[in-house]
Every structure is written in C-alpha cells, then in structure tokens.
C-alpha cells in the first residue's frame, strides 16, 4: 500500500477519532483539511442568519451551527449553519439538512461557490443553499424546484429574497446587521 493511500480517511474513521478542542476540520475526499478561525464579521453574519432563521422555523425543524454534513464515504463538510427537520441519528448528529448556509471568506470563497455548493445540491434532503459573502453585501440563493435547481443572480445592497422553506422574505439588512457592510 502506498503512503498516499494510508493517509486517506473515511468519514467514519474521521468522526471516530473525536473532536480536537479549538480545531475546526473538514474531510475533503479522504483528506483532513483544517479550517481557519472565522473573523469577527463572519461570526456576526452567522449569528444574524441563525436569528433570522430561528424566528421563522416551525417544529420539528431546528438550526444547528457547525454541524457536519456527510457528502459521501470520504467527504464531510462543516457549513456555518444547517437546518434539519429530521431527528438526530443514533450518535446525536444532525442529518438530512434542508437548508445549508455558507458564509464565504476570502480563503474559501471559490471552493464554497463551486465544489461545496454543487455537493450540497446533490443531497436529496437539501431544498435551499444560501451563500453569503463576509466582505461585501452579496448573497446568492440556490433553490430546489421540481425540475432542478434555480440559482439567483447575486443580490446586493438592501435586496430581499424569499425563502420558500421558511415561508418568508429575508432582507440583506437582517443578515448584515452590525457588520458595517
């Protein structure tokens, strides 16, 4: 067995090793990738999204920050926020996300907009994906329709968008409150 083959992890092995305090990691195609700590503005946007979503959720759905989302046997992403309406699995993990929120940071923007968004769209349970920029007022929404996915053009300024999942409009002012953007 080659050295490279021994370095690859499965999601099960990655989760079984347990969390490392103070370290955020994801599993990308069998490789462990460290995630940089979020900047203050990033965290404020996540908090604003949690508040906006929680106000509109109906039971049994719940919002969860930093929940791992299993993509396949060797990939586990950790979006900023997920909404699930399913009971947790036997290990207490969030499953079947219906809404996934990624706050884009400079280092991960292209990866989140590309590979991650595409991977999330392949999850049968996922109905909406929100991509929120952390450096400028810029939001893109992916919405599952009967015939496939609809992706909005970037929204800017004081725009509002309708979340079919939440049954309400969300304003960018709400998502960017207290950020100076």
Image (cartoon, rainbow, N blue to C red):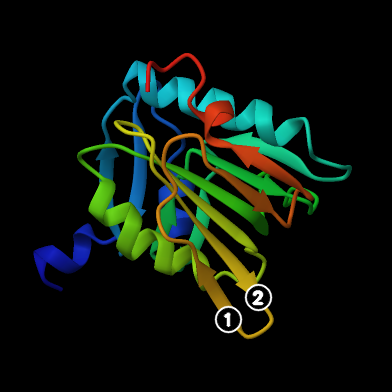
- Residue topped by disc 2: 145
Toward which corner of the image does residue 50 lie, by quadrant?
top right
Q: Quadrant of the C terminus?
A: top left
The relative height of residue 118 versus residue 135 in the rendered view (above or below) is below
Residue 11: image x %, image y %?
44, 58
Does dot 2 land on a helix, a strand or a loop? strand
Extreme residue in the left direction: 3
95 vs 57, nearest the viewer: 57
What residue do we see at 69% from left, 81% from top? 146
Residue 74 in sight: yes
Q: Residue at x 68, y 37 (%)?
A: 63
**Horizontal side, residue 60 vs residue 90: left or right:** right
Q: Nearer the viewer, residue 152 or 100?
A: 152
Q: Residues within 10 Å of mark 1 (few under 14, many from 20)?
A: few
| Tag shown at residue 148 | 1
Residue 56: quadrant of the picture: top right
């Amino acid at each position: 067995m080659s050295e490279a083959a021994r370095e690859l992890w499965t999601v099960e092995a990655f989760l079984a090793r347990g969390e490392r305090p103070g370290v955020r990691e994801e599993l990308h195609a069998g490789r462990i990738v460290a995630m940089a700590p979020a900047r203050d503005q990033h965290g404020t946007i996540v908090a604003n999204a949690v508040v906006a979503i929680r106000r509109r959720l109906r039971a049994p759905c719940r919002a969860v920050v930093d929940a791992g989302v299993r993509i396949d046997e060797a990939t586990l992403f950790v979006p900023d926020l997920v909404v699930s309406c399913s009971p947790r699995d036997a290990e207490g993990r969030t499953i079947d996300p219906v809404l996934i929120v990624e706050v884009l940071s400079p280092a991960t923007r292209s990866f989140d907009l590309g590979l991650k968004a595409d991977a999330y769209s392949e999850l049968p349970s996922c109905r909406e994906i929100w991509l929120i920029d952390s450096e400028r007022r810029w939001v893109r929404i992916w919405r599952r329709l009967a015939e496939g996915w609809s992706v909005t053009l970037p929204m800017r300024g004081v725009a509002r968008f309708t979340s079919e999942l939440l049954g309400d409009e969300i304003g960018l002012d709400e998502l960017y409150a207290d950020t100076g953007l």
